Amino acid sequence: MRAELITFAGGKRELEGYLVFPDKPQPSPAVIVVHEIWGVDDHIKGVARRFAQEGYVALAPDLYSGEWRDAMKPDKIMAGMMVLRDAPPEVQRDPARMAEVLATRSPEEQKALQTLMRIMSSQQRQTFAEELVGASQYLATRPEVDADRITSMGFCMGGGLAIHMATKTPDLWKTVIFYGENPPLDQVPAINAKVFGIYAGKDRRITDLIPEFQKAMEESGKAFTYKVEGGTQHAFFNDTRPMYNKEAAEDAWQEVLRFLAKE
């Protein structure tokens, strides 16, 4: 297994990425590992290496390349997250009510949350999804990659972006969502990838909305299966976070490998 730090064209800017190759005959299928709100940290790099050990080329694009680098440092993200955690799911989904919450916070908390909400806005997610198309295009040019078998996969913010990317990448092979938000439902007909979702039982902000995504996929004749890991919190797969659930994470990993091994 070998790893490289690379750059590639992502929309209108250059993105950095962590690229890992397996020790096996090539070309190999590839997985685009889209990071959580925390960026390409040791956990995400570790997931990429785990895929390489299973025989996949893995690319973890860094969406915080360039202009986002300072604004999305872990301490600033955490400050914004602490404010969000005090707001119930129905408030988080309502911009007007979130603005009311924001007005009660200190200037430092307001700045951190404003940055976080900008990252989480539909407009910025649209931009990130468009930039991630460049990751698929880059992998398709690599001789080590089987260009017909490229998968997008992400966690939390990255899970939503992985499926959003699928609406913009018609030749994507498969997509795996780890507790990510649904894509714009009017864009579901553009998805050609087979989709598998893994969700947390106690993560109601995300999990309660699975049925509407499932219905949209069924009505469009798209392939979507999913599993809810009961008793788990959002981010249960991340072993660097307090929500980590070892049993559920190991089960989810095997489910992903089985899904990718089909066909």
Image: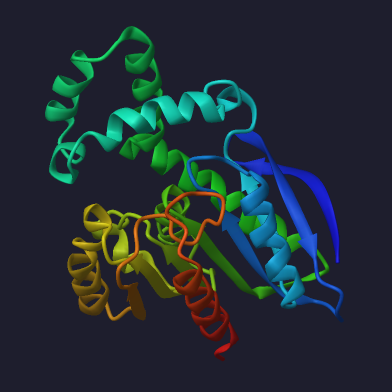
Seen from the viewer's position, the closer of residues 134 and 31 is 31
What colour scheme does the image use?
Answer: rainbow
Seen from the viewer's position, the closer of residues 23 and 145 is 23
The quarter of the image holding the C terminus is bottom right
Q: Is residue 111 left or right of residue 71?
A: left
Name the residue located 83 percent from the left edge and 78 percent from the top edge: 26
Name the residue located 33 percent from the left edge and 78 percent from the top edge: 222
Is residue 72 visible in the rendered structure shown here?
Answer: no
Image spot of residue 110 (x, y percent): 32, 16
- Tell which residue pokes out farthest to the top in this image: 107
| Location of residue 228 (image quadrant) | bottom left
Image spot of residue 169 (x, y percent): 50, 61
Q: Is residue 87 left or right of residue 261?
A: left
Is residue 71 visible in the rendered structure shown here?
Answer: yes
Seen from the viewer's position, the closer of residues 19 and 187 is 19
Q: Indicate whether 193 appears above or below 244.
A: below
The quarter of the image holding the N terminus is bottom right
Image spot of residue 13 (x, y percent): 62, 33
Name the residue located 18 percent from the left edge and 23 percent from the top edge: 101
Count of numbered circles in the view? 0
| Location of residue 105 (image quadrant) | top left
Name the residue located 24 percent from the left edge and 66 percent from the top edge: 210
Q: Is residue 126 left or right of residue 19?
A: left
Q: Is residue 53 left or right of residue 255?
A: right
| Location of residue 96 (image quadrant) | top left
Image spot of residue 43 (x, y percent): 62, 52
